[in-house]
Image (cartoon, grey):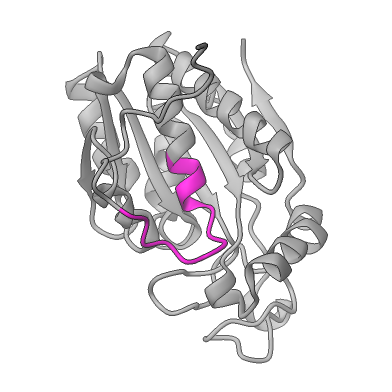
Amino acid sequence: MELIYSRTKTLQEDKVSGFCPGCMHGTVMKLIGEVLDEMDMVKHAVCTLGIGCCGLHMDYVAYDNITSPHGRACAVATGIKRSNPESLVFTYQGDGDFAAIGLGESVSAANRGEKFTVIFINNGIYGMTGGQLAPTTLLGMKASTAPKGRVAEEHGYPMHMSEILNQLTAPAYIERTSCNNPQNVMKTKNAIKKAFRYQMEGKAFSMVEIVTSCPTNWGLDPMKSLEFLEEKMLSEYPLGVVRDIQ
């Protein structure tokens, strides 16, 4: 019998996912694990976690990880990669962690061309901490701190982190993907693999921004959340390669 699929070794066998139904964190974690398996880099991987739902990552994976103070994952990853350049170092951060509280650390690491990878989960809202307005929240989209919806005059406009970092000289690779259908799941996996490969080739900063859903804090069921993602989120955050320095 031909084996066509096997479970990634990076996921703990005795753990059941605690993510909400319709959340895409589990899918992204699985893709990261598959890439590490295929690259034979599980023993050399170090993940620096942001706070919130991203921090739950640690409960399910079998590779080294460390939780940083809120927003400081890029600063911690900088130290890890500089002191262990042979390791495959990546951060796993949400939009509140990467684009709000850690904006200074994120932009500075990209500007320096630090040789690690950011996996940026963009679901347009703060997750575990209560559904507050995030830098990526859409105009008109409601949040616990914007119950009438995001208003540009009061809250500013949604921030496009891939495009912002593309204004810098140093980054080597930036791509925005999603996991809303099988085709995009495979594109996300390929983007993660390319970012990791570039890192191990000694190229500068790389980021894969993954547009995902948050049914709980969006106040929608999983299917309605998927529709909102496809109709609204992807209109604001178009998918594709933003930068690729071969």
- Picture residue at 52% right of the left edge, 28% below the top: 192
Image location of residue 86, percent across then percent down: 25, 13
Residue 112, above or below 1: below
Question: Quarter holding the C terminus?
Answer: top right
Residue under the image location 25 percent in, 51 percent down = 59
Span highlighted in magenta in the image = 16-29
Residue at x 53%, y 86% (from the top left corner): 144
Q: Is residue 118 visible?
A: yes
Say whether residue 167 is visible: no
Q: Position of residue 103 (x, y in %)?
A: 44, 54
Q: Position of residue 212 (x, y in %)?
A: 60, 54
In the rendered view, does 111 fall on the left or right side of 139? left
What main secondary structure does the magenta stretch of the protein show? loop
Residue nearest the viewer, comparing 57 with 159:
57
x then y, percent, for residue 167: 64, 36
Q: Residue furthest front?
A: 1
**Residue 241's quadrant in the figure?**
top right
Q: Is residue 10 magenta?
A: no
State yes or no: residue 25 in magenta: yes
Residues 213 and 80: in front is 213
Image vertical order of residue 127 relative to residue 108, above or below: below
The residue depicted at 60 percent of the width and 31 percent of the height is 174
